[in-house]
Amino acid sequence: MTVNELNAIISSSKKAVFFGGAGVSTESGIPDFRSPDGIYMSKQKYPPETMLSHTFFMEHTEDFWDFYRNMLYCPDVKPNAAHFKLAELEKAGKLTAVVTQNIDGLHSAAGSKNVYELHGSALRNYCMKCGKFYTADEVMSVNGIPECSCGGIIKPDVVLYEEALDDDIVSGALNAISNADTLIVAGTSLTVYPAAGFIRYFGGENLILINRDKTAMDSAFSHIIHGKVGEIMEKIKL
Ligand code: NAD
């Protein structure tokens, strides 16, 4: 598919939905997981999938926080052309929702209003004992395990492996996807479940993939562009 064809489909859409992953934020300087320079390729004490699990958080809380601070927290990042274009499309009445697997908050920072953050947000942290919330700055500035004023342990408000997604976010996201006339999937290897399975709820005509590399699900799409999502979305004119 060409960018002009993508432009034509988006222009004629009234209820497009965008479903994205870590690749949407690589052009903002945040590494993804599975690219050659991704977090999964870095040398760690334990495999990253293990370190990002609920069990690991509970049993090795300090190692979790070290890994999370050093590898997953990217301060001062800014939205890129993809984030800004999606906010513009929503404002123009073309796009109804962004469903993201990312935890970086960049869609909201770019101005998108209806954002479903399936895996939570690194901008929020909460005390596991009293529920008090803390900002990223508050927890990132301490060494070791961040503790609440009540003595409880603070956890990022992100969904770790073995943890369930939030019911309201899931139903909002699935409702938007199943009512969409166009679904644009981008920057995701489509390997993290249940999120990757959400695209099966789309019943419309145009199922579009914009991704740098091939995914295991390429054959499911009606239109594909292999390339950088920021560079491609920047060319969309309304
Ligand atoms: P992934 O790392 O498994 O795959 C990223 C995909 O994006 C790859 O297929 C790659 O080819 C593609 N890609 C990379 N840069 C791109 C670009 N500029 N344009 C188009 N495509 C590009 O990521 P995933 O499928 O999202 O799964 C990883 C999980 O990790 C997610 O659940 C997410 O929660 C989390 N994660 C989030 C962030 C973030 O918040 N920014 C960063 C890393 C990981």
Image: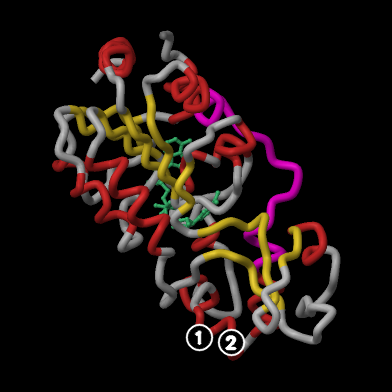
Label 1 sits on residue: 55
Quadrant, the C terminus: top left
Q: Please indicate, yes or no, whether residue 80 appears anywhere in the rendered image.
A: yes
> In the drawing, does residue 204 fall left or right of residue 99?
left
Is 86 magenta? The answer is no
User: Residue shown at 51%/80% (left/top)?
Assistant: 54
Q: Nearer the viewer, residue 210 or 198?
A: 198
Residue 116 on image: x %, y %: 45, 47
Q: Is the residue under label 2 in contact with that under label 1 (CB below 8 Å)?
A: yes
Q: Nearer the viewer, residue 52 or 172?
A: 172
Q: Which residues are magenta?
A: 68-84
Residue 205 on image: x %, y %: 14, 28
Q: Disc 2 on helix, strand or loop?
A: helix
Q: Measure how far apart labels 1 and 2 are at the Cα level.
A: 5 Å
Q: Nearer the viewer, residue 232 or 139?
A: 139
Coloration mode? secondary structure
Note whether 83 is above or below 6 in the view shown: below
Label 2 sits on residue: 58
Is 82 magenta? The answer is yes
User: Residue shown at 44%/74% (left/top)?
Assistant: 163
Quadrant, the N terminus: top left
> In the drawing, does residue 214 fall left or right of residue 56?
left
